[in-house]
Amino acid sequence: MFGLGNSGIGIFPIQQGSGQGSIPKGVFRISSHDPTVSVNPPQTGAIWVNATTGEIFTCIDNTENRNVWKSQFGRVIAPSSVPPFDILNDNSCVAYFPFDGNANDVSGNYNGQWGGNERYISAGWNQTAFFDGASYINVKQPVNSLSAFSISFWVKTEQLAEGDAYWTNPTMIAMATTGNSRDIGIACRNGNLHIWTGNCANGDVYKTTDFFIANNRWNHIVVAVSSNRIDYYVNKQHGFLDACYDHLDPQDFYVGVVYHHGDSNPLKPTSWFKGAIDNLRFFNKTLTQEEVDTIFGIENPYPTLG
């Protein structure tokens, strides 16, 4: 049973079912702290109230010692392996950064390295990386040699800044080189998702999309790159950009800034990003709408989103 223990002030059945010996439809606990993944309530739908912060959690998975809780603010408390690394069950995810207290890749192949202030906040799934406008993470080269790839991540920001060139807007994910380069950047221009790329012989291509993401809410972004176009998704909504592609230059990806290899001033101040990024993934293929929907459904930290 969802016993009292030492961590709760009280547990009370609510909305009792009819009939003798019936199981309560809900269980309620007031505590001085958040629930953990090993609380183990008797059923999903159990309510946990953190009396210190006022945050209210609902149990959405009561698997023994692997509970998942969501609060009314959308914060998720879950085992570190949730969401799973191989989220599509097809070995297409090559790197996954949950940012739960570190910048490690779950695969162990592309562990990130911070520059500037390393900071994590309680949000999204357990924790998320927070960028203060002067920090970044180097996540190496998980997809540079591939003929197609995709990047998926969650972002929360209210940054409305605009740079003096299309590639100097506040940048969430990018790898960049100078001259005739094969690179890509995912940025935020005046609050809208902005994508730029240098590919093949077609020169630089860029687009400020119609998707406003600086709304201080979690937004799911996917950028899927193939030979003749870049598809992008914001909270499952789709758009595309015509762009030639065959591979990326062998330079590292950065999160939170554009690092222009070879420039005399490599870190562009106008490219710094301020906000939170969570569940960054790199895939070895172009994701489809159905696969984007699947990722969104599993990772969505907000029950009211989508």
Image (tube, grey):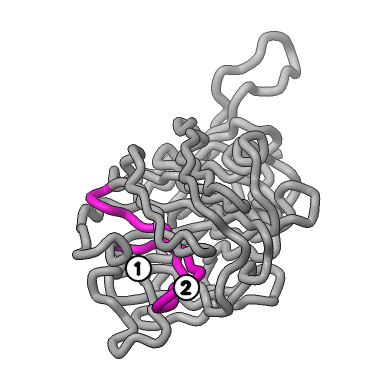
Mark 1 is on which residue type?
Answer: Phe
Q: Residue at x 45, y 42 (%)?
A: 74
Mark 2 is on which residue type?
Answer: Ser
Q: Is residue 45 left or right of residue 267?
A: right
Q: Residue furthest front?
A: 201
User: What is the crowding at mark 2: few (fewer than 14 residues within 10 Å), some, or many (at least 20)?
Assistant: some
Q: Residue furthest bottom?
A: 264
Residue 131: numbered disc: 1
Query: What x and y, as percent, mark residue 49?
Result: 45, 41
Nearest to the observer: residue 71 or residue 281: 281
Residue 245: numbered disc: none
Q: Residue at x 60, y 30 (%)?
A: 45
Tell me if residue 247 is in the magenta stretch.
no
User: What is the crowding at mark 1: few (fewer than 14 residues within 10 Å), some, or many (at least 20)?
Assistant: many
Query: What x and y, as percent, mark residue 20?
Result: 74, 13
Query: What x and y, as percent, mark residue 199?
Result: 50, 63
Q: CA distance from mark 2 to mark 1?
A: 27 Å
Quarter of the rendering containing residue 282: bottom right
Q: Residue at x 46, y 33 (%)?
A: 305
